Image: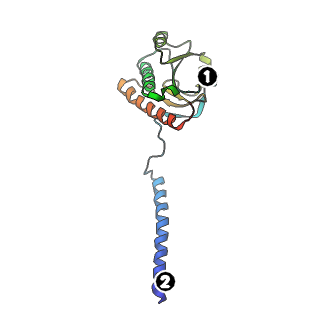
């Protein structure tokens, strides 16, 4: 009479061991062979460590997220696309746009003709700074492209410049997605 009970308990133990061991083995294989997307969902290039923008003192009294662009000496196609994207992303944020500020940083070397055009737009804030301060903040980082700054004056994401208009529009969608995620997760700004 004890033999069937031993077989039954061995089978129960085998089933229980399988139920706990198989998922662990599958998880280990999934991690080793990269069967899933690693949880990086941002489309921009993460700047690590974040750049401290406090030397520029470009923040306003209100704590806001910032879409930042550094106006180059010659504003060519990629520059014009970036400025257009900056305005479009800000507009596409809809009711959340009061939490975000589009900001163009200009130096003494920036394109004066483009600066005059920017002055006519009321949606983009133009901030003038010295070149040495800009270089101090963006020391080892490429300054072309669009940046996202958080409410604590840290630059956290960079988006590469786009020469083609179609690519710039698609790129703007990526910036918008990331900005919406940041605003959703943040209670500040």
- Residue at (40%, 19%) from the top-left corner? 77
- Residue at (51%, 34%) from the top-left corner? 183
Q: What is the x, y in percent for residue 162? A: 41, 25
Name the N-terminal-most of marks 1 and 2.
2
> Where residue 6 is drawn, which disc sits there?
2
**Residue behind mark 1:** 61
Secondary structure, mark 2, is helix
Question: 10 Å neighbourhood of mark 2: few (<14), some, or many (≥20)?
Answer: few
The outermost residue toward the right is 55
Q: Are marks 1 and 2 in contact (CB under 8 Å)?
A: no
- Residue at (49%, 83%) from the top-left corner? 6
Q: What is the x, y in percent for residue 152? A: 61, 30
Position of 4 with respect to 189 (left or right) is left
Report how far apart the C-alphas of labels 1 and 2 lie in the structure.
Answer: 76 Å
Q: Nearer the viewer, mark 1 or mark 2?
A: 1
Secondary structure, mark 1, is loop
> Where residue 154 is drawn, which disc sits there?
none
Image quarter (top left, top right, bottom left or bottom right) of the C terminus: top right
- Residue at (50%, 14%) from the top-left corner? 73
Q: Is 112 situated above or below 47?
A: above
Q: What is the x, y in percent for residue 63? A: 59, 27
Q: Is 33 situated above or below 58?
A: below
Question: 10 Å neighbourhood of mark 1: few (<14), some, or many (≥20)?
Answer: few
The outermost residue toward the left is 166
The outermost residue toward the front is 95
Q: How many marks?
A: 2
- For residue 108, say whether it is visible: yes
Q: Nearer the viewer, residue 166 or 32?
A: 166
């Amino acid at each position: 009479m004890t033999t069937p009970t031993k077989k039954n308990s061995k089978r129960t133990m085998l089933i229980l061991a399988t139920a706990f061991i198989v998922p662990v083995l599958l998880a280990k294989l999934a991690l080793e062979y990269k069967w899933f997307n690693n949880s990086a969902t941002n489309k921009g290039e993460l700047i690590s460590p974040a750049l401290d923008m406090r030397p520029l003192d470009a923040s306003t009294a209100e704590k806001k997220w910032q879409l930042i662009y550094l106006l180059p000496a010659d504003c060519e196609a990629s520059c014009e696309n970036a400025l257009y994207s900056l305005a479009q992303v800000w507009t596409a944020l809809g009711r959340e746009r009061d939490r975000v500020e589009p900001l163009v940083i200009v130096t003494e070397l920036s394109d004066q003709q483009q600066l005059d055009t920017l002055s006519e737009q009321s949606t983009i804030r133009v901030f003038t700074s010295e070149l040495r301060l800009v270089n101090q903040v963006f020391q080892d980082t490429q300054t072309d492209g669009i940046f996202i700054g958080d409410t604590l004056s840290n630059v956290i994401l960079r988006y590469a410049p786009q020469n083609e208009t179609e690519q710039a529009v698609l790129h703007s969608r990526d910036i918008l997605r990331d900005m919406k995620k940041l605003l959703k997760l943040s209670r500040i700004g």
